[in-house]
C-alpha cells in the first residue's frame, strides 16, 4: 500500500533529496516549502508521516507540531523532525511536544528512510 | 563663454549616458543570470536527488556552459553540507569525476578575491584530497580570509600530514597576530600554545591529540573553540572568547 509522506523544508535541495529517497521507497511524497504550507497540507492531505524541518519561514517546525497536536484528527500523526546536530534543548522541547523521531543534520537519507519505515511500522502495529 | 559651457554639458551628458548604459547592461545581465538560474536550478536539484536516491542511477551531467556548471556545483555543495553517509560519498565522487573539484581548485588562483574565497569554502565542503596541493598554495594567499578558508579546507581533510604545513603557515606572522593556519589549528582543538600541543610534541602523537580525530564538520560544528580568531582590522586577527 502506498502511504503518503509530507516533507516540509524551506531548502529545495534538502526537500528534493528527502522526497527522492522516500519516493524510491515507494511512498507518495507531498512537499511543503514553509510551515504554513506544511500545516495546510497536513490538514488537507492527512499524510501517514510528516518529515519536518525545525527552522522554516512563516511557522517554525515546533509551531507546526504544536498546532497539529492541538487537533484531534492530527494528534497522532507521527512526525520526524530534522534539526541541527547538538541541539539538545530542541530535541527535548520537540519530544515534549510529541515529535516521534529526530534526525540531526547533516543527515543520511538512507537513515531517514529507515526511521520513517520504523515509524510506519509502529502505526501498523497500533492498528 | 557659451562654447565651454556647452562642451561641459556635452561631456557630462556623455559620462552620464555611459554610466547609465553600464548600469542598464549590468542589470540586464544580472536579470538574465537570475532567469537562467531559476530555470536550471530545480532540474539540477531533482537530477542530483534522483541520482543519490538510486544507487544504480546514471550520474547527472552538469549543464554546460560554465554558468551551468557553477550552478551545478553550488547545488551540489548545498547538498554536501546537509548530507552524511554513502550519499555524501557518492556526491563527492561525482564532483571529483566530473572535474568540478579540479575546476574549483584552479579558482584558488583567480585574481578576484571573492572567487578565491568561495573556491576555498567549496573545497572545504568537498573534502577532496586532490585539491590539497592548491590549498597548500592558498595558505600563502595575500588575503587573510582566503588563507583561513584554505587552512580550514585542509583541516577538513583531517590528515596528519597537513599539520606541519599549517604550523609553517602560522609562522609567517607574529604570535600576537597568528595567521590563518594557527587560527584553524585552534579551532580544530589544538591547544592555545599551537606549537606545543599535547605535551610539547611538535606534532600530535596520535590523531586524538590536538588534531581532530573525527573528521570534518564535527571539527567545526561540535568542537567549538573556547577561543576564536577572526579577521581584525588591517588584516590582523582579533581574538574573542566564546
Image (cartoon, helix red, strand yellow):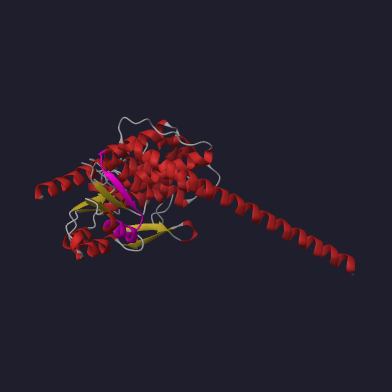
A66 vs B114, left or right, is left
Residue located at (34% from left, 31% from top): B57
Q: With respect to residue A8, does A71 lie above or below?
A: below
Give the image location of residue B104, x and y in percent. Answer: 46, 39
Residue located at (23% from left, 64% from top): A66
Stretch of the chain drawn in magenta: A25-42
- Among the 4 quarters of the image, the one containing residue B161: top left
Query: Considering the image in quadrants, where does the C terminus of chain B appear?
Result: bottom left
Q: Which of B185 and A88 is in front in this view?
A: A88
Q: Residue furthest bottom?
A: B1
Give the image location of residue A16, x and y in percent. Answer: 35, 45
Residue B161 appears in the picture as rendered: no
Q: Does the magenta stretch include residue A38?
A: yes
Residue located at (33% from left, 50% from top): A31
Q: Is residue B24 magenta?
A: no
Q: With respect to residue B116, does A52 lie above or below?
A: below
Amino acid at each position: 500500500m502506498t502511504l503518503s509522506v509530507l516533507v516540509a523544508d524551506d531548502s529545495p535541495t534538502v526537500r528534493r533529496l528527502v522526497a527522492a529517497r522516500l519516493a524510491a521507497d515507494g511512498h507518495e511524497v507531498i512537499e511543503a516549502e514553509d510551515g504554513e504550507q506544511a500545516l495546510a497540507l497536513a490538514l488537507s492531505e492527512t499524510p501517514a508521516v510528516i518529515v519536518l524541518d525545525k527552522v522554516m519561514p512563516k511557522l517554525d517546525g515546533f509551531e507546526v507540531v504544536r498546532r497539529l497536536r492541538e487537533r484531534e484528527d492530527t494528534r497522532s500523526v507521527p512526525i520526524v523532525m530534522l534539526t541541527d546536530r547538538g541541539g539538545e534543548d530542541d530535541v527535548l522541547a520537540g519530544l515534549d511536544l510529541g515529535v516521534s523521531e529526530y534526525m540531526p543534520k547533516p543527515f543520511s537519507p538512507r537513515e531517514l528512510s529507515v526511521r520513517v519505515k520504523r515509524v510506519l511500522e509502529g502505526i501498523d502495529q497500533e492498528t | 563663454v557659451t562654447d565651454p559651457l556647452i562642451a561641459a554639458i556635452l561631456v557630462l551628458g556623455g559620462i552620464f549616458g555611459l554610466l547609465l548604459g553600464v548600469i542598464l547592461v549590468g542589470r540586464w545581465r544580472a536579470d538574465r543570470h537570475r532567469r537562467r538560474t531559476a530555470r536550471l536550478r530545480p532540474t539540477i536539484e531533482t537530477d542530483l536527488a534522483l541520482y543519490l536516491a538510486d544507487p544504480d542511477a546514471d550520474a547527472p551531467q552538469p549543464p554546460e556552459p560554465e554558468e551551468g556548471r557553477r550552478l551545478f556545483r553550488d547545488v551540489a555543495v548545498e547538498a554536501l553540507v546537509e548530507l552524511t553517509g554513502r550519499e555524501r560519498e557518492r556526491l563527492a565522487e561525482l564532483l571529483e569525476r566530473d572535474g568540478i573539484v579540479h575546476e574549483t581548485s584552479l579558482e584558488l588562483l583567480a585574481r578576484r578575491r571573492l572567487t578565491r574565497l568561495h573556491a576555498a569554502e567549496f573545497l572545504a565542503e568537498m573534502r577532496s584530497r586532490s585539491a590539497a596541493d592548491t590549498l597548500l598554495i592558498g595558505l600563502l594567499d595575500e588575503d587573510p580570509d582566503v588563507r583561513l578558508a584554505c587552512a580550514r579546507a585542509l583541516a577538513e581533510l583531517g590528515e596528519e600530514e597537513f599539520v606541519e604545513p599549517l604550523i609553517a603557515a602560522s609562522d609567517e606572522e607574529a604570535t600576537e597576530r597568528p595567521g590563518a593556519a594557527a587560527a584553524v589549528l585552534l579551532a580544530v582543538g589544538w591547544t592555545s600554545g599551537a606549537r606545543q600541543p599535547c605535551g610539547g610534541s611538535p606534532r600530535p602523537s596520535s590523531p586524538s591529540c590536538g588534531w581532530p580525530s573525527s573528521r570534518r564538520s564535527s571539527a567545526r560544528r561540535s568542537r567549538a573553540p573556547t577561543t576564536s580568531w577572526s579577521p581584525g582590522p588591517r588584516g590582523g586577527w582579533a581574538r574573542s572568547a566564546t
